[in-house]
Image (tube, rainbow, N blue to C red):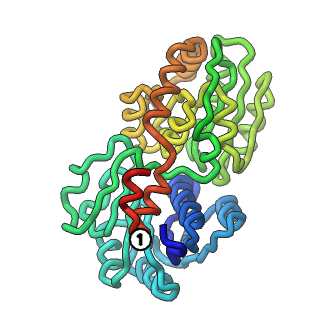
């Protein structure tokens, strides 16, 4: 890998409405870029305070953008920033960025990596498209430039630095699971966290311990804290930076089916997945198809009794949890951010063998 790969501009946002997943996976790529000796700079129009603090604590610069998100002015500001810093690459991640946005950055002569999930942009002119999901398929990108390279599938899951220490770790599978981790994303606007915690109070397993992770953009902190106070053993954590350690602690996770699903797979943590946003359906289905998680479907269609039953069944079934653990570890090897960084640095031969 090159000694100093230069500056990487990352354009992504985080808010209550869109959650923090786009910024978090760009954060993983920024850390890998730092590890390669480079300088990452985030350009954000919307950045939740907790997310800003986390990036700054990691010595990552943040440039605030006062623009209409995803429009011509947005692309022009990013273009100016990239040219000012002689950026090696620009990374763009978010559903508000489309085909015109890519074309504008490419017309400025910039090298562009576009992080995608479901082919929402229609046409792709980025140099590289990364889709880290198990359902990623070339057919999503039939309308792309001849030079556009596709990096598809879970080999390219972007995991933050904190997960590296667990690469050779082996999970012990309890005969009856009792430790449940609840993480419904960075914002959880519909408060599926409370729905999940209420269901666990009804689960037919004695001695359940619950740790509830509340993202920095979650507006329901106080109501969840009041609910947790009625639970025999429940802890609410806000803006935790050691989620990997919590995943290692737990026997089962209740989670939104966003990018967190791939973190759970890597950690071998059996998961009960709720579709909280429409674009999460393919992730939940892929996790279930790969026997790494349980797809509970669209959150609004689920009753507390159904969630309680699903949780109880999985906590009591050690054989199924063991299978899910093994399937998840096979699905995600944790080297995705390093692979992508090596490709950006031009060392693709190493990337393919990494």
247 vs 187: above or below: above
State left or right for residue 145 relative to residue 11.
Answer: left
Q: Position of residue 123 (x, y in %)?
A: 24, 64
Taking the spot 60% from the left edge, 26% from the top edge, the residue there is: 252
Taking the spot 30% from the left edge, 82% from the top edge, the residue there is: 107
Write down the residue under mark 1: 70
State left or right for residue 225 relative to residue 304.
Answer: right
Taking the spot 46% from the left edge, 75% from the top edge, the residue there is: 68
158 vs 85: above or below: above
**Residue 1 is at least partly visible in this image:** yes
Q: Position of residue 231 (x, y in %)?
A: 77, 25
Q: Nearer the viewer, residue 270 or 282?
A: 270
Q: Nearer the viewer, residue 146 or 275?
A: 146
Q: Classify residue 50 by image quadrant.
A: bottom right
Q: Residues within 10 Å of mark 1 (few under 14, many from 20)?
A: some
State left or right for residue 296 relative to residue 146.
Answer: right
Q: Position of residue 90 (x, y in %)?
A: 44, 73
Q: Classify residue 66 by image quadrant.
A: bottom right
Q: Classify residue 44 by image quadrant.
A: bottom right
Q: Position of residue 272 (x, y in %)?
A: 52, 28
């Amino acid at each position: 890998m090159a000694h100093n790969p230069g500056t990487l501009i990352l354009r992504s946002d985080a808010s209550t409405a869109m959650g923090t997943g786009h910024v978090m996976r760009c954060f993983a790529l920024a850390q890998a870029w730092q590890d390669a000796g480079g300088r990452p700079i985030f350009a954000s129009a919307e950045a939740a305070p907790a997310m800003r603090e986390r990036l700054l604590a990691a010595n990552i610069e943040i440039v605030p953008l006062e623009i209409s998100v995803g429009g011509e002015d947005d692309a022009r500001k990013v273009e100016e920033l990239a040219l000012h810093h002689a950026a090696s690459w620009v990374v763009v991640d978010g559903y508000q960025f489309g085909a015109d946005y890519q074309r504008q950055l490419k017309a400025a002569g910039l090298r562009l990596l576009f992080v995608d999930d479901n082919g929402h942009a229609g046409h792709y002119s980025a140099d590289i498209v990364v889709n880290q999901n198990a359902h990623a398929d070339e057919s999503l990108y039939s309308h792309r430039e001849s030079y556009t390279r596709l990096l598809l599938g879970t080999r390219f899951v972007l995991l933050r630095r904190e997960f590296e220490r667990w690469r050779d770790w082996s999970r012990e599978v309890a005969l009856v699971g009792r430790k449940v981790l609840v993480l419904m994303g960075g914002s959880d606007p519909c408060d599926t966290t409370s729905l999940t915690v209420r269901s666990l109070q009804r689960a037919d397993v004695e001695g359940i311990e619950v740790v509830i992770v509340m993202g920095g953009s979650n507006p329901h902190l106080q109501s969840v804290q009041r609910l947790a106070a009625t639970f025999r053993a429940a802890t609410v954590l806000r803006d935790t930076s050691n989620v990997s350690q919590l995943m290692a602690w737990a026997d089962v996770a209740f989670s939104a089916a966003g990018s967190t699903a791939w973190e759970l797979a890597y950690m071998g943590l059996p998961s009960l997945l709720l579709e909280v946003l429409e674009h999460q359906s393919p992730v939940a289905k892929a996790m279930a198809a790969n026997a790494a998680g349980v797809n509970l479907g669209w959150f609004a269609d689920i009753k507390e009794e159904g969630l309680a039953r699903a949780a109880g069944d999985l906590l009591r079934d050690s054989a199924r949890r063991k299978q899910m653990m093994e399937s998840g570890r096979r699905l995600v090897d944790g080297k995705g951010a390093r692979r992508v960084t090596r490709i950006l640095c031009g060392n693709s031969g190493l990337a393919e063998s990494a």
